[in-house]
Image (cartoon, rainbow, N blue to C red):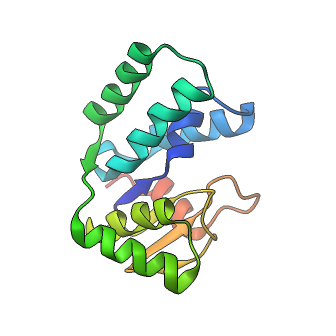
Amino acid sequence: MRVALDTHILAYAEGLGDERRVTLSRRILAAIPQERILLPAQTLGELYRVLVGKANREAAAARGAVLEWSDAFEVADSTTACFIAALDLAVDHQLQFWDSLILAIAARARCRVLLSEDLQPGFTWGGVTVVNPYSPAPHPLLEQLLADKD
């Protein structure tokens, strides 16, 4: 099962945020086989903004972190088709455009799960289900991801 990651997962794994989310993000990333993880390019741009703007990292250090993430996992670019789908999602479901773009990219890349705390947990579109990995009760798809090593 392929899984796309939203920006917060990466930011927490970088050590930003509360200890529970940082630890859980790192545990999730260590448990899911690397080849199953997809990073929408949008998340890398957002991560850079968070590292520089909120974490006050030097621009070069933030660039280095983003490049490490892009080296570690498959990155999916934004396409015109994804932008149009994101516009439709924003209008039809009242979602934020940039969150919609991440979901559209995940769907185009045939991910089954988008790990995100920004979108409505359980929302499914284009075959992708949004799962909040920080929910007190783990979603069955997250449990399956963490248990399935093949």
Q: Position of residue 144 (x, y in %)?
A: 49, 63
Q: Given the current orientation, which residue lies at the most extreme bottom position? A: 92
The structure residue drawn at horizontal position 35% and vertical position 33%, both measured from the top left corner, is 69
| Residue 63 visible within the image | yes
Across and down, in percent, residue 85 comes to 35, 76
Q: Residue at x 37, y 29 (%)?
A: 66
Q: Is residue 77 above or below residue 107?
A: above
Q: Nearer the viewer, residue 123 or 83?
A: 83
Report the side of 39 relative to 28 (left or right).
left
Q: Is residue 128 above or below residue 11?
A: below
**Whole-percent x, y for residue 71 in the image:** 26, 31
**Res 1 seen here:** no
Residue 16 as seen in the image, left or right of residue 102: right
In the displayed structure, does residue 140 sit left or right of residue 126? right
Q: Quadrant of residue 128?
A: bottom left
Residue 97: percent from left, percent from top: 48, 65
User: Which of the 4 image quarters holds residue 20?
Assistant: top right
Quarter of the picture holding the C terminus: bottom left
Q: Is residue 54 left or right of residue 6?
A: right
Q: Nearer the viewer, residue 55 or 112?
A: 55
